[in-house]
Image (cartoon, coloured by chain):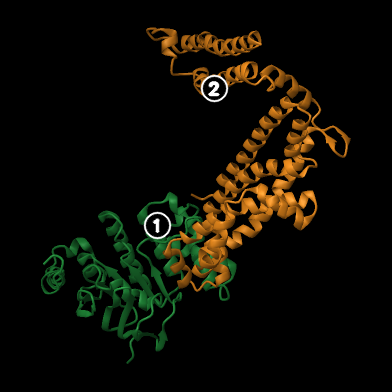
């Protein structure tokens, strides 16, 4: 096992050093071109700040170092501390198997990991969409009216910290089927950032904007659409972003208990079959999808945020 | 003959946790059509409150405001306001900021093309037509205030209300905007009430200067006519004896007769 770990470390170290050692050769070529006609300084030194390669190294080296540390620690743990946890090599092999045919369908309960992820995403987006549709108007009401704040405030504070797993039995009793319960759990746990951020956005709208609306005699509907909604948009987008992150986290937990098709259920199923390597692959996949969702929200924020 | 705009025995009392606070009392002022009136006084003497009452943003506790023989106690585009903090909506472009006002006020009376032309016309009046597609975040403070003025003018108000419009700007920008405002007033002949701290600005721009006493329970101390011929040029007036006399009168009122109690 130690030999395996050392082999991995050597592979990674070779890659990192080869990046570094490859650089001077290219650098000196550019330096040579640049140094034509000038009293030549050291080629490597002259091009030290120029060039794509040094910048790439600066960007990639730290995370690569972290990666090697993680791989080393992982190897160590799986070799010496918890032999039931597979090491990086075994996991990599399992990943190749799982990702080779991500969309197979052998039966209603046996599908490729691609389908599992898509089903989970479907539930997340369903719950998230409901949270947005309900959360934004409620957030507006809470932000605009002190009476609503007093009426709804305590309820929001009580329900906000409740774990999704505690909502699951309620959902199953209400809806009696897996998919609606999961969507309900997503909805009830991810709606709070939207409500609170929207309310904060509405409350922070400067008085002057409202005075402009009053001088123009805008109707309440016009005020809501033309002034409140755009003014609160940055806060609303922040709330949506937090909500989506929570929703993706919650679905994995919820699906472990509900069964069916989904990445959470996949993790639980593989655990029951003691395929720990699959679990680790699933963890990485969950992370990658999380990054993709973040990237989508980033794009939305840049597109719609005027600040 | 009734005044164009009349502030009749206006008083306002705010209820605060510490008890009722009389901000203004017995404010009486008549303003004719086309007049440019400045209101000047120490900080906290209720100048903005008077403007808010005329604008309808605050309600007087006693008395009221009459415009063209009709009482006004609610806000409306007939008394357009230029706020001290421009209050442009940051998610709209310069054009859209003026258009939101024009589209609301002239929804029924002007066609879409007419409204577009009217927006462009008003932006040209304040020399902001070149920046129509910029957002407020991309233009300077002086430019933002110009757009604020364009927006107010575009409503074709019966009275234009300006609340220390140039207070947040540097002296040079202020001078440019004062000249622009004088030009516009000369061209359109609109009725203007402006709140200012700046004595020179008041004397240069106004037909009459209303000097407020100190708060609380502030009221009008003195009203002074400024009989300088128009159009007025600041450089010519710098050496003018009459201009300096008016200036001295206002300063005397502010610093001798109504000395700021905190400075005493």
Residue toward you, A30 or A218: A218
Residue A286 picture location, percent across and down:
67, 35
Q: CA distance from mark 1 to mark 2?
A: 49 Å
Q: Give the residue number, with chain letter if any, for mark 2.
A: A66
- Chain in green on the image: B
Query: Dot 2 lies on which element?
Result: helix
Both marks 1 and 2 on one chain: no
Label 1 crowding class (10 Å Cα cut-off): few <14, some 14-19, many 20+?
many
Q: Quadrant of residue A288?
A: top right
- Chain hosting mark 1: B
Query: Dot 1 lies on which element?
Result: helix
Above or below residue A56? Residue A30 is above
Residue toward you, B17 or A206: B17
Which shade of the palette goes to chain A? orange
Q: Quadrant of residue B177?
A: bottom left
Quadrant position of the C terminus of chain B in the picture: bottom left
Residue A134 picture location, percent across and down:
64, 59
Residue toward you, B40 or B128: B40
Residue B71, visible in the rendered structure: yes
- Chain hosting mark 2: A
Looking at the image, which residue is at 22% across and 76% down? B212
B93 left or right, relative to B206: right
Q: Give the residue number, with chain letter if any, for mark 1.
A: B144
């Amino acid at each position: 096992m130690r030999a395996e770990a050392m082999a991995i470390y050597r592979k990674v170290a070779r890659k990192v050093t080869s990046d570094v050692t490859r650089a001077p050769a290219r650098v000196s070529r550019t330096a040579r071109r640049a140094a034509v006609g000038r009293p030549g300084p050291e080629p490597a030194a002259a091009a030290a700040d120029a060039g794509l390669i040094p910048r790439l190294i600066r960007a990639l080296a730290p995370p690569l170092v972290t990666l090697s540390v993680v791989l080393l620690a992982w190897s160590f743990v799986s070799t010496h501390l918890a032999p039931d946890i597979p090491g990086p090599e075994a996991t990599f092999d399992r990943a190749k198997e799982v990702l080779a045919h991500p969309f197979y369908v052998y039966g209603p309960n046996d599908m490729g990991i691609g389908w599992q992820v898509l089903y989970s995403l479907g539930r997340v987006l369903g719950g998230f969409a409901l949270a947005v549709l309900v959360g934004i108007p409620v957030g507006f009401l809470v932000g605009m009216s002190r009476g609503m704040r007093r009426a709804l405030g305590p309820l929001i504070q009580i329900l906000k910290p409740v774990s999704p797993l505690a909502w699951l039995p309620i959902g199953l009793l209400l809806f009696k089927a897996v998919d609606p319960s999961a969507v309900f759990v997503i909805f009830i746990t991810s709606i709070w950032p939207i409500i609170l951020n929207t309310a904060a956005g509405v409350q922070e709208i400067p008085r002057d904007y409202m005075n402009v609306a009053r001088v123009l005699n805008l109707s309440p509907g016009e005020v809501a659409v033309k002034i409140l909604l755009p003014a609160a948009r940055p806060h609303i987008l922040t709330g949506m972003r937090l909500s989506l992150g929570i929703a993706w986290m919650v679905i994995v937990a919820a699906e472990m208990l509900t069964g069916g098709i989904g990445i959470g259920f996949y993790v639980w199923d593989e655990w029951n079959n003691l395929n720990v390597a699959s679990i680790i692959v699933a963890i990485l996949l969950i992370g990658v999808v999380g990054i993709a969702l973040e990237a989508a929200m980033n794009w939305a924020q840049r597109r719609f945020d005027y600040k | 003959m009734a005044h164009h705009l009349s502030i009749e025995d206006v008083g306002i009392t705010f209820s605060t946790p510490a008890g009722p606070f009389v901000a203004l009392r017995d404010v009486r002022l008549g303003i004719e059509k086309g007049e440019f009136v400045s209101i000047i006084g120490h900080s906290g003497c209720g100048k903005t409150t008077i403007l808010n009452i005329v604008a309808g943003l605050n309600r007087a506790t006693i008395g009221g405001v009459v415009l063209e023989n009709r009482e006004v106690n609610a806000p409306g585009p007939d008394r357009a306001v230029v706020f001290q903090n421009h209050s442009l909506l940051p998610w709209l472009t310069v054009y859209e900021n003026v258009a939101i006002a024009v589209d609301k006020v002239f929804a029924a009376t002007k066609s879409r093309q007419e409204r577009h032309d009217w927006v462009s016309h008003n932006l040209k009046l304040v020399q902001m037509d070149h920046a129509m597609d910029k957002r407020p975040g991309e233009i300077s403070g002086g430019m933002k205030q110009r757009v604020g003025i364009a927006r107010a003018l575009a409503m074709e108000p019966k009275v234009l209300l300006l609340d220390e419009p140039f207070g947040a700007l540097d002296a040079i920008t202020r001078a440019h905007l004062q000249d622009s405002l004088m030009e516009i007033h000369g061209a359109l002949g609109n009725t203007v009430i402006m709140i200012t701290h700046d004595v020179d600005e008041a004397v240069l721009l106004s037909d009459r200067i209303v000097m407020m006493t100190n708060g609380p329970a502030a009221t009008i101390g003195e009203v002074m006519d400024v009989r300088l011929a128009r159009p007025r040029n600041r450089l010519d007036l710098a050496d003018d004896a009459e201009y300096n006399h008016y200036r001295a009168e206002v300063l005397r009122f502010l610093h001798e007769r109504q000395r700021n109690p905190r400075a005493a």
